[in-house]
Image: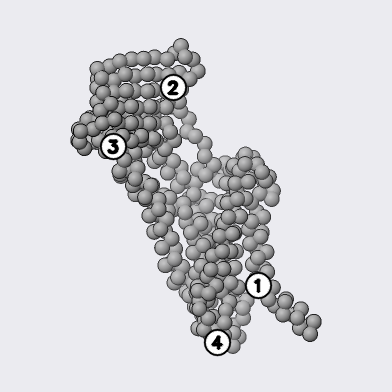
Amino acid sequence: MISRYLIGEICKPLAVILGIFIVLFASYSAAGFLADAVKGLLPVDTVAEMIALKALISLEVLIPISLYISVVLGFGRLYGDSEFIAMFALQVTPARVMWAVFMLSGALALVVAGLSVIVRPLAYNELHELSKRAEGAVDVDAMAAGTFYVGQHGNRVIYLSHRDGPDAPAQDVFIKLQRHDRTEIIYSRFASKLRQDNPQVSLTDAHIYTLDPNDEREDQVATAGGIVINPDSTDNAPPEYSSVAASTAHLAASSLPRDVAELQWRFSTPISTLLLGLLGVPLSRGRPRQNKYEKFGAAILIYSAYYLLCTSARTWVQHGVVGGFPGIWWAPATLALLLVTFMYGPSLTAKFKRRQA
């Protein structure tokens, strides 16, 4: 009964805090996606899906911090209202309190493990696929004159010199398309979409320059009174490898520093979830009638320092500055040492002072 009550006191703020973090992160992601959609660089119907995927990927970070803050705030209230004093008077031991937090943190750690090991690469794969399709998608009618529109990976650049109105054809259009084995530069006097549901663009009075980076003799120049191109078309270039989108099994068989760093990151997130949940217990300790937010600032500083350590360690492993061992594991080890210090440091200090007296 006590364990259920303690878990409930954590889950109530946890649901609120996690919801707020998800909304804030989704809003931040939406700002960039919607800006690209307004500029015609991103199809509107893919915006919601990309935002959802980004939010799903972020859960492996948002769940641990939400749990950590919820323990600090929830237990801080129990200390401030003297409920813990009453519990300890009824023979509820600190070990039992820690066990309740351990059960909740362990369950959430399993959820985070599934997100990191399985869901994360799948979500990144889908996000990269959507980005690749959006890289070529273009809505000329939505573009404003006098602005360079650059694709996400720089494979496409579009510039419109003039437009008489929203529905009027674009004038003096410059298009650069970077293919796998060549570069195409197109200048057109007028450009407009054929239909709203068709990505093809009609170019009038066009000059096409095809450049071969390997052999200048293969460069070509052509002129056409009218042509139709599809900026959404892609060639057979192999997809760019990304560690974040690779399967965990593939990462486990790889010795590349970036793959090692990504694999260790995926396995470290559930460990961080468990340690952060437990760390919230000693950080929430306080006096009766103490403000429950009094320890909040110190808790946030500790988490910020830990997150900085984790991301720095990951970057060092990616660039080969630190080897696969200790890899990024020294960061969770530091957090575990801090947990032990906060848990047993006060009692050891008190025993030492009694002996000195």
**Label 2 vs 4, first from the N-terminus:** 4
Q: Is residue 151 above or below residue 15?
A: above
Q: Give the Cα distance between marks 1 and 4.
A: 21 Å
Tag on residue 182? 2
The residue carrying mark 4 is 86
Q: Quadrant of residue 253?
A: top right
User: Three-letter amino acid code at disc 1?
Assistant: Met
> Which numbered disc, 3 or 2, marks the residue closer to the eye?
3
Secondary structure type for disc 3: loop
Picture quadrant where residue 160 is located: top left
- Specify the quadrant that holds the C terminus: bottom right
- The amino acid at mark 4 is Ala
Give the number of the mark in front: 3 or 4. Answer: 3
Which comes sooner in the sequence, label 1 or label 4?
A: 4
- Front residue of 25/291: it is 291
In this image, 268 relative to 157: left or right? right
Give the structural element (helix, strand or loop) at label 1: helix
- The residue to which callout 1 is attached is 343
Which residue position is annotated with label 3? 143
Q: Amino acid at mark 2?
A: Arg
Q: Which three-letter amino acid code belongs to the residue tagged 3?
A: Met
> Is residue 71 in view?
no
The residue at 28%/37% (across/down) is 144
Q: Residue at x 61, y 78 (%)?
A: 94
Is the residue under label 2 in contact with that under label 3 (CB below 8 Å)? no
Question: Which dot, 1 or 3, sits closer to the camera?
Answer: 3
Q: Earlier in the sequence, mark 3 or mark 2?
A: 3
User: Can see residue 323?
Assistant: yes
Name the foreground residue: 135 vs 287.
Answer: 287
